[in-house]
Image: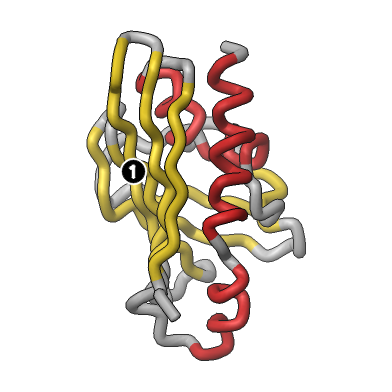
Amino acid sequence: MSRVVSARREVAASAATIFELIADPARQPLWDGNENLAEAADDQRVRAVGDVFRTRLTMGEVRENHVVEFEEGRRLAWRPAEPGSPPPGHLWRWELEPLAADRTAVTHTYDWTDLTDEGRFRRARATTSERLAASLDRLAALAEGC
């Protein structure tokens, strides 16, 4: 079984518009196709590798998300962790490829290649390309309505 799953689609919106929806954690629960994110505080907009933003999951747990890849308007990836703990090794990545001023190819990837906590494997396996596509569809609906 592959430990990397992804989904890709074209969105009728600019890369800048889409990136704002991804880079602002307070807006992430609006497009989360895993229905895992409950909320995130305002004023956590991601701006660089090394940033950490906090989200609350639907089950009530808090995650600190460590930004490990960042290119404004193009790429954002983070590794979630329990507060005060190092990330256990899974990664969420968003990549945006501008196709035109108002059209962008968006790829969403979940990579658990480096996940070491066997207690998380079941949930990792349940994160399918269909769930990632659901996030893309919700993101597209938001971005195309902006």
Measured as percent of width and height from the top left, residue 89 is found at 38, 74
| Displayed quadrant of residue 110 | bottom left
Measured as percent of width and height from the top left, residue 101 is found at 32, 9
Quick one: which residue is furthest to the right in this view? 59
Q: How is the image coloured?
A: secondary structure
| Displayed quadrant of residue 99 | top left
**Residue 26 visible in the displayed image:** no
Residue 95 sits above or below residue 35 on the image: above
The residue that label 1 is drawn on is 76
Quarter holding the N terminus? bottom left
For this view, does 31 lie left or right of residue 58? Answer: left
Instruction: Say which of 63 and 6 sits in front.
Output: 6
Quarter holding the C terminus? top right
Q: How many marks?
A: 1
Q: Quick one: SS at disc 1?
A: strand
**Residue 119 visible in the displayed image:** yes
**Crowd rating for badge 1 (residues with CA inside 10 Å; few <14, some 14–19, many 20+):** many
Residue 67 sits above or below residue 10 on the image: below
Please name the residue shown 43% across and 55% down the image.
6
